[in-house]
Each structure stands twice: as structure tokens, then as C-alpha cells.
Image (spheres, rainbow, N blue to C red):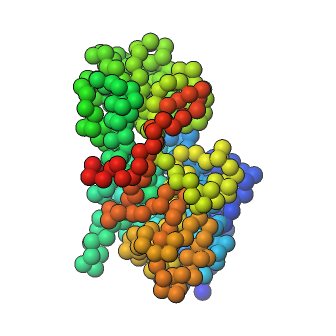
Amino acid sequence: MYHVKIQPTSDTVPTRGRRHRGFDRARRLSLTWTRWRIRDIGRDRSRRRADPLGSLVPLTGSAGAFGESMQRAIDLAVEHVNRSGGVDGRPLELYSADTETNPKRARSKLVAMIDDHDIVGFVGPYSSGVGTTLAPVAAAHQVMEVSHGNTSPVLSGMGYRAVDGQRLKYYGRTAPNDAQQGLVMARALTDHVEADSAAFLYVNNPYGEGLAEKARQAFDGEVTSMVAYSRETDDYRGTLDTVFANDPEAVGFVAYPENGRTIIEQWHEGDYGGTWVMADGINDTALLDDLSGVLDGHYLSSPIPQRTASHDTFVSAMGGADDVQLYSSHGYDALFLLALAMQRAGEASGAAIARHIRPVSHLGTTVGVDEFATAKALLSDGTNVDYEGASSDVDLTDRLEPVVRYSILQIRDAEPTTVEQVPVSWFDGKL
């Protein structure tokens, strides 16, 4: 048996179990670690001592506000699986990278993970703009991708590849399809703002374009304009002039925190008027605190985590609700589903995960957060499991995506306050 010394790049950091909390995430990603690892011989996965998975989250860039919490949640899932003896007795080994919220940079880091570490699956990315770039790469290499934050409708049809005469989908997600959120934003505009006219302002990428278009289609009033904004500037006054040229009563806003903050500040300074209905991508605690006097009375749409025992266990393990950011629970669920699929398949490969990830998400004995040992025992006895996640039931459809509850929130004293819950049943026949 050969031992090869692996020196990961500064972009890719291996870990088993709980990470050292003494280093902040950005610093750890800049370090180069050297460690011994038993290497596959001829890439024979049956001889591995650990199963390599990846994570790609935004620690920097326009969505960087969410990345730290997301990565901690993914690390937590690795810890829970490994504490239960790993998958078929092998620990998970996680390689993590910062997408920088940049499709080209994220693609190069994913290819490096595949080439250098032979990962069989990964969690991420968060941004749909990055997701549409990575999905073809994952399918081409037969690596299973489970995004915790991609919501663009276009991704429902991505990630397919024929394997041994079977059409497998190498792309799944624990985040909901924005076909749902578009309906919810339109409902907020109509029922809560009571707007007869609206403009839509969105980040110029698949996430922004896809969600804004779904909301436009669902809105019953007059659409005065559809305006895409660039992330490559910090002056949005001309963009805002275009949005408000026809005096819309409301604006449906699809953005990330970094640019979204600047746009809202310049909207306030310019006294443009109107009511904002914002998508979940801007639901950042620091932003809402800083702009509380500006955004009070305006609206947000957001998926609702189910307040189940699984959700409570997750929040407690993360250190409390204040340490749980947007879509971090979805990151935990994505990693846990990858591990469950490998356990059910008895094999650590992308194709095996693609075949088995949906069965472990529904129709079986319920298991939840930090119950990997229970799931292993059930699966070894031939009993299927139904994973009830930290974010939702995570019952994946045939397109490997969940349908979830949503909330319409109004910002009051910097706090998003629920004004309506939209149940899963309301979406029947609308998607």
C-alpha cells in the first residue's frame, strides 16, 4: 500500500469532523496544510480509507455575507456522520473552497477538487449564476452536485447524463425552485402592497433573471419595466432612474446583499418612492440592521424552515439561532443526503449517489438531523429511510428538488416579521 503526501492548494482545505474554531474561515482557506492521506491506487475507489466530498460556498464576493454560516453547517454534518462511524465504516473527508461568487473561479476550483482529490460529490454552490456553470462540469465528470442555495428555475433541467443506458441526474438541490418564490413575490405585491403596477429590478445572472421573470408572469398588475443591474459598478442612480421612469407603485427586487445595500441606499438618497418586495437573497441580518430606518414597512419573501425536532437539533448544534444564516440549514441537509445515498448504495461514486439520493429523501422510516447511526442500522436491515431535514422535509421530486412552505415578511424595526405563511398545498397546480 502506497502513501502519498498531499499538499492541498490554498483554495482547497481537507477536513474530518469538527474544525478548529480558533481560526476564522477566511484565514483557514488562505493556509496551506500538509497531511498524510492514503491515496487511491489507479483511482480504485474500493481501496479508499475515506470518502472525499467537496463544498463550494461564497466566503467572498457579492454573496459573501452568507458563506461562513453555510460552511459551518456543512462541517457540522460531516462531524455528525463521522461521529456515527462514517459511511460503511469510512470517514468522510471534506475539501472546501470559496466560490468568490464568481462562476469562472468556482469552475476552476471544482475542476481542481475533482482532479486532485477525486471527489464523488459536493455541496454547493449558493449562487445560481455559479450553479449553471458548475452543473455541466459535475455531470461530465459523473460527480453528484447538491446545491444548498441555487433557486433558478433553469437548473431543474440541468445535470443529466446517460450512464449504462440510464438517464441520471447529477444535479440536485435542497433549496426550492424559484418558480415558487416568483408566485410568492407576486402574491405579496398584489395582496399586501395592493399594487396595480410594479417594476422588477434584478441581478444580471440566472438567479435574478429567472426569479424576476417568474414573478412578472405571476403578477396581475401592469409591469412598467424589467431592469437588470450589473454587479461591476457602485453607482446605480441611472439604473434607478430607469426603474422608476414610469412611476411604479412597487418594485420586485432580486439581489445579493453587497450590491443590494448600495442600491437601497441610493434609492433612499434619491427619494424615488415606491414599496420594495425583496427576494430572499437580500435577507441578511447585518444589512437589515444597518438599513432599518430605510426598509421598515417594506417586504421580503423567504422559504420557511420547518420547526421540527430536526430543525431544533440543528439550531442548537450551530450554537443558537443567531449563528444560523440564510440557507445554512440547506447546506447541512445537502451533505447529509449525500452521505445517506452512499450508505444506501453501498458505494461511494457519483452514479451511486445519483441513483439513491431521492429514495433516502422520502417514503421510509423517518430519520433526522444527527441520526446517521439510526439510518445506517435501518438501511443495513433493508428498511428504507425518509430524511427529515433541518430546512424542510426535503422530499425530493423526480427533478431532485423540494417543494417547501414560504412566508411573506414585513420589516418592522429591522426585524422581518411574518405577515402570511404560504403552505405547500397552495402551490399545487401552479408550478
Q: Residue at x 37, y 74 (%)?
A: 355
Residue 292, x across and y down, in percent: 58, 25
Above/below status of 15 relative to 260: below
* Vertical side of 101 occupied by 147: above or below: below
Number of numbered tags placed on the structure image: 0
Residue 298's spot in the image, x, y percent?
47, 26
Query: Is residue 377 visible from the viewing direction of this image?
Result: yes
Residue at 29% across, 41% down: 214
Viewer-proximal residue among 370 and 267 = 370
Q: Residue at x 48, y 16 (%)?
A: 268
Residue nearer the viewer, 82 or 58: 82
Task: Tell me residue 426's x, y (percent).
Answer: 34, 48
- Which corner quadrant holds the N terminus? bottom right
Query: Where, by quadrant of the figure, is residue 218 drawn?
Result: top left
Q: Which of the two residues, 227 or 360, is positioned nearer the viewer here?
A: 360
Q: Nearer the viewer, residue 117 or 84?
A: 84
Q: Residue at x 58, y 45 (%)?
A: 325
Q: Is residue 235 above or below residue 72?
A: above
* Left or right relative to 285: residue 236: left
> Would residue 195 appear left or right of 14 to someone viewing this image?
left
Q: Residue furthest right?
A: 22
**x%, y% of residue 349?**
44, 75
Q: Is residue 32 visible?
A: no
Q: Is residue 134 above or below residue 323?
A: below
